[in-house]
Amino acid sequence: MCLGKTPVCNVPTGQCVQCLSPSDCGAGNFTCDANHTCHATCTGSSCPVGQTCQADAGVCFDCLSNLDCVAPTVCGPNNTCVRCVTNANCGGQTPVCAQGSCVQCGSASDCPTVSPICQNQQCVQCVSNAGCSGSTPVCDLNTNRCVGCLSSADCGGATPVCGANRTCVPACVSSATCGGNTPVCKTDAGTCVQCLSGANCGGPRPVCGPNNTCVGCLTNPDCTNPARPVCDTATSTCVQCTSAANCPTGAPICSNDRCVQCTSNANCSGATPVCNTTTSTCVQCAKGSDCASGVCNFGSCGACASTSACDAGVSTCLQGPPSACAACTNSNQCGGLNGACDTASGACTGCLSNNDCGGLTPRCDTVKHKCVECLLPNQCGGGNNVTCDATGTCRRTCATQNDCAGFNGGTCQVDAGYCVQCTSNSQCSTQAPKCDTSTGRCVQCGSDADCPGTNGRRFCSPRGLCVQCRENVDCPAGTVCDPTLFCN
């Protein structure tokens, strides 16, 4: 019976195929090719997304050349993208191309001497005992490797017992001949085992299980720790619970062997309607949008101190009292570094046009929404040797130290090709003691920690100046953060 993607029986070959004629391809404009594959017919660009029209045949194909496929796939003989067409497209652990896929082998000739059989496109050592000999005469069909034994029935003579490492070993008559992980002799079987009773076990696995191995428990009475009083018989370990019946009222749900308060919001209500799935506890909020203020602080709603506390890209920390995360509706609600309101997203941003910029950064980079010094080299003064770098900063170019004569100390950073004022703090003055190595300029600060708070200047601006604010919420009620980053 033929099903799925190959629902039609090609009787002469006895193979299931997609089609024998166009009528097998369903409604629409389709044709059945010589490989019994359905293709949409086409003219020009009428093919489905991801397919290409072969104009002379009027048929849509997945590919006509390798250029139509995403590397490392290539265009195969049936005009479909496949991993390989020849062995040259394969390598490493899968060097052979078979039916469009890179595999370990296609036949025994592709396999090494130590694993000479190709089974399911994998080189293996054996598929039956006939492939094994010597000290490893038995084929382990789970691993397709030759071993000494799978059970004691494969052993005999002086070594009648199949040991843990799949080799025949002498039978034990006392524990004196056992050791390692199997220190006890099970004399009726002549095998060394881990335990015969709980007396041979200890620590976290104090019980001897039916397979003569030490386990955590077999029944609930084996679990003596009050924090884990239930035996999970599937794993033979003591746990807090295996069902809700083992859990108290305050944490009524058994999840992953633990009693928890919730696994989803459906388990929570009242003043704590949200499930914190990390701690499995009911809380007031898990994210800003759960709160009227727009701010969630460790599971509780509260006022925001900065926009960084708000859901990114969709709200801004607007002045209060109390301050709250909300979508801006006009630029008067914004200020400082992000003085323009993008009403489409509801977030305050650096700029939307040049009208939002001024001073030392008069132009708007509308991709980054950031006010910058320049966007093009001709927007910088100073002649042909001044250019606009990728950060929107005017920079003097140089090849030698002579090119920087008279320019802020005249140091040429040859590898970057720019004149810089500094390359380390030691080259800066007390008025601007920090070297901003990204721009090569001496600045007042590199972080807020460098700003002492004198006259309210407690923030470090992107240009390395100590300022009073970065956004309106940094200013007292009734004042806003102006473009110079001072509260007015």
Image (spheres, rainbow, N blue to C red):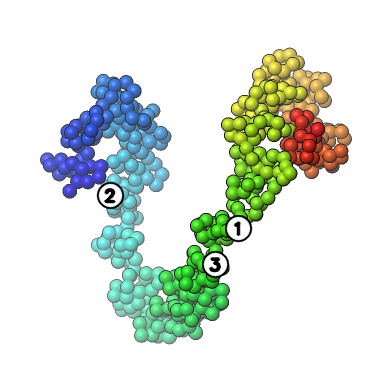
The quarter holding residue 341 reads: top right
Residue pointed to by mark 2: 108
Say what secondary structure mark 3 lies in.
loop
Residue 231 x %, y %: 47, 75
Marks 2/1: CA–CA distance? 69 Å
Residue pointed to by mark 1: 271
Q: Is residue 207 visible?
A: yes
Residue pointed to by mark 3: 251
Q: Residue furthest top?
A: 383
Question: CB under 8 Å between callouts 3 and 1?
Answer: no
Left or right: where does residue 469 sit relative to residue 258? right
Say what secondary structure mark 2 lies in.
helix
Left or right: where does residue 387 sit relative to residue 74? right
**Depth check: 339 or 124 in front?**
339
Q: Residue at x 38, y 85 (%)?
A: 187
Q: Residue at x 32, y 73 (%)?
A: 151
The quarter holding residue 424 reads: top right
Q: Residue furthest front?
A: 270
Q: Residue at x 38, y 36 (%)?
A: 73
